[in-house]
Image (cartoon, coloured by chain):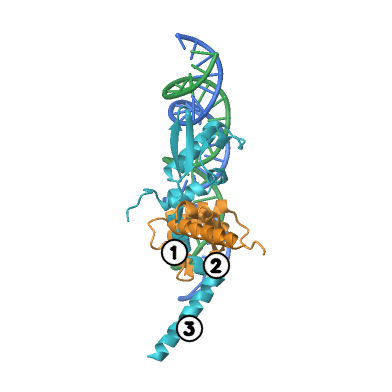
Chain colours: A cyan, B orange, C green, D blue
Amino acid sequence: MVNHSATSLDSTFSALSDPTRRAILARLAEGEVSVSDLAAPFAVSLPAISRQLRVLETAGLIARRKDGRVHHCRLKAEPMREAVAWIERYRRFWDEQFEALAEYLKRTEEEEKNRC
Amino acid sequence: MVNHSATSLDSTFSALSDPTRRAILARLAEGEVSVSDLAAPFAVSLPAISRQLRVLETAGLIARRKDGRVHHCRLKAEPMREAVAWIERYRRFWDEQFEALAEYLKRTEEEEKNRC
DNA sequence: ACAATATTTAACCACATGGTTAATCATTCA
DNA sequence: TGAATGATTAACCATGTGGTTAAATATTGT
């Protein structure tokens, strides 16, 4: 399997650490949105949003399509897969379910062993 | 359910965006480690590590126990739960399995409707 | 009391980040 | 062609981050 995202956990987590950028991603979950429409809800200038978008694009979290003078952004969530995969390794440290499962597996293994 | 972590997605993702800090967390997954032992593998000064630890502590990702002059750190993964929960909302944008499940659910729903 | 050890804090530096306004580029429309 | 629109880039500023070395703090061992 090839690494299509060509990005790193560094840039992914870094991109996700800003609330404005997370809000932008949330909006894009509903579909393509133009840069202006994307900027409208925020109390910052268009150049500010433009740079947030560049951060997201560099992190591989969005892609653009240019239609005339309007730039449409869309979500590209692949890097999140990698991020979740990293965090998941720690699930057992917070998840009771995980502990319950571990307990169950340990028990069945014992039983398996006793049968031999 | 009370919010025990008292931290934000901002600080969690921000803390996770640094490779040194992620390596520290990885090490702590094996159990408690003193600050010195934690610092040893890295080619940076102790004060540098001390500040990384403060970032992790502020984010709620580690806690400390002081035993004499030795400070022991341990993993506190709860904030990761929140982080994963946020990212999971985008799973369908990268996960084929998710699409397959959505497809399945849609189909069963149809059948359910036809039965009534 | 004093030296050594574990760690943090202080003061500093270089660089990244997020915001601003003004200027520029690209495209549409009159 | 020229004005208006959508978006980016440039230049600048304040603040945050991660590193350093030197100093301070806390604890242990002699």
Q: Amino acid at mark 2?
A: Trp
Q: Position of residue B26 (x, y in %)?
A: 44, 64
Instruction: State the image coordinates of residue A37 (x, y, percent, origin top left).
Output: 56, 35
| Residue beneath the point at 63% across and 63% down | B4
Q: Is residue A106 above or below residue B46?
A: below
Which element carries disc 2, helix, strand or loop? loop
Question: Do callouts 3 and 2 point to residues on the same chain?
Answer: yes
Residue C19, placed above or below residue A11:
above
Numbered mark located on residue B26 in the image: 1
Residue B64, position as x, y percentages in the image? 55, 66
Q: Note whether B45 is above or below A89 in the view shown.
A: above
Farthest residue toward the front? B115
Q: Chain of mark 1?
A: B
In the picture, measured across the screen, residue B11 lies left or right of residue B45, that is right
Question: Label 1 to label 3, Cα distance in Å?
Answer: 27 Å
Task: Judge by depth and name the residue closer to the eye, B81 or C11.
Answer: B81
Q: Residue at x 53, y 36 (%)?
A: A49
Q: Residue at x 55, y 46 (%)?
A: A26
- Local secondary structure at mark 3: helix
Tag 3 residue = A107
Q: To which residue does mark 2 refer?
A: A94
Identify the residue at horizontal 47%, vertical 71% (top origin): B31
* Amino acid marked by disc 3: Arg
Q: Residues within 10 Å of mark 3 (few under 14, many from 20)?
A: few
* Mark 1 residue element: helix
